[in-house]
Image: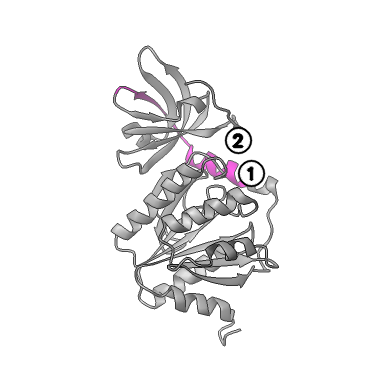
Amino acid sequence: MSACGVPDAWMRIADRAARPGGTVVLIGGSDAGKTTLAVWLAGRLAERGLRVAAVDADVGQSRLGPPATVGWAWGAEGRPAGLRFAGDVTPAGMESRCLAAVGACAEEARQAGAEVVLCDTTGWVSGAGALEYKLAKTDLLRGSLGVLVEREGELQPYRRALRGRVAVEVLSVAAVAAVRPRSVEDRRARRREAFAAHLREPVEVELDLRTVGLTGLSWLRERSLLGLADGSGRLLALGLAGALDRHAGTLMCTAQAAGAGAAQVVVGRIALDAEFGELRCTETEP
């Protein structure tokens, strides 16, 4: 423990992360303390004069934007500088969409002048699918430092898999004991509140599908969650699907007013009920 009460392992991580052009990927299970570490690390690096961008890739418990999105901000607790729609609150089965959203946010941050990019990931770490997804994300982000936030060696498969990657240094740190575990019900309640806040005071929006791009038609249902984006894929607003008129080529939805300027609409894999609870959708023939 350092003189200021910070774990020595955290200080080592800050020293390794303080390299302009680097990307730090935080990997750990739910409630392990990844976000706590990310917030501290962003502040520590900023104190050293580095421009730090934080990419929040936790689509289930996002701090920067609504659930089912990936966002980035200057520092770990700033206002979102950019959001991308992933379309679900878990990356399982949506890996390609989530990776595209993470990559776009990181590249946008770098183009804006970020010297260090910190990526906070979901707590999905169990199983081969989770491992492959985290490795793909590390490769996509050109990760230079992988930080394993773990309990009792649970991330040993990640340590083995990352070993040998010349560009990636791997450091481990113990999970933060002070983090209060959240139940599945608590997580769902938080998402319900966040969806309600982002879909407050909606307006009716008619999307002309002859000029607006549409992705994910096979998941479209009444009240499907929609991401209304500009031509570069930046999220303008969330929406809820209404009637699709195939003959007229229009899709009605409710969204905040900013969504009316959408150039693209992406259909999510979930729908929301009248209380903003999640309903899982299955694919149908488009």
Residue most extreme to the bottom: 3
* Image quadrant occupied by the N terminus: bottom right
Q: Indicate the amino acid at tag 1.
A: Arg
Q: Is residue 143 above or below residue 252?
A: below
Q: Residue at x 51, y 79 (%)?
A: 12
> Bounds of the magenta span?
188-210
Q: Is residue 154 magenta?
A: no
Q: Which residue is mark 1?
A: 188
Estimate the x, y position of residue 49 in percent, counting from the top left.
Answer: 35, 76
Q: Are marks 2 and 1 in contact (CB under 8 Å)?
A: yes
Q: Quadrant of residue 262?
A: top left
Residue 46 horizontal side relative to residue 30, left or right: left
Q: Is residue 28 above or below residue 102?
A: below
Q: Does residue 6 appear in this view?
A: no
Gap between marks 2 and 1 measured at Cα: 8 Å
**Other residues around mark 2 within 10 Å, as few (<14) / some (14–19) / many (≥20):** many
Residue 146 horizontal side relative to residue 232, left or right: right
**Secondary structure of residue under mark 2:** strand
Display coloring: one colour
* In-front residue for pair 262/158: 158
**Other residues around mark 1 within 10 Å, as few (<14) / some (14–19) / many (≥20):** some
**Secondary structure of residue under mark 1:** helix
* In-front residue for pair 123/92: 92
Q: Which mark is residue 278?
A: 2
Q: Indicate the amino acid at tag 2.
A: Glu
Estimate the x, y position of residue 164 in percent, counting from the top left.
Answer: 50, 67
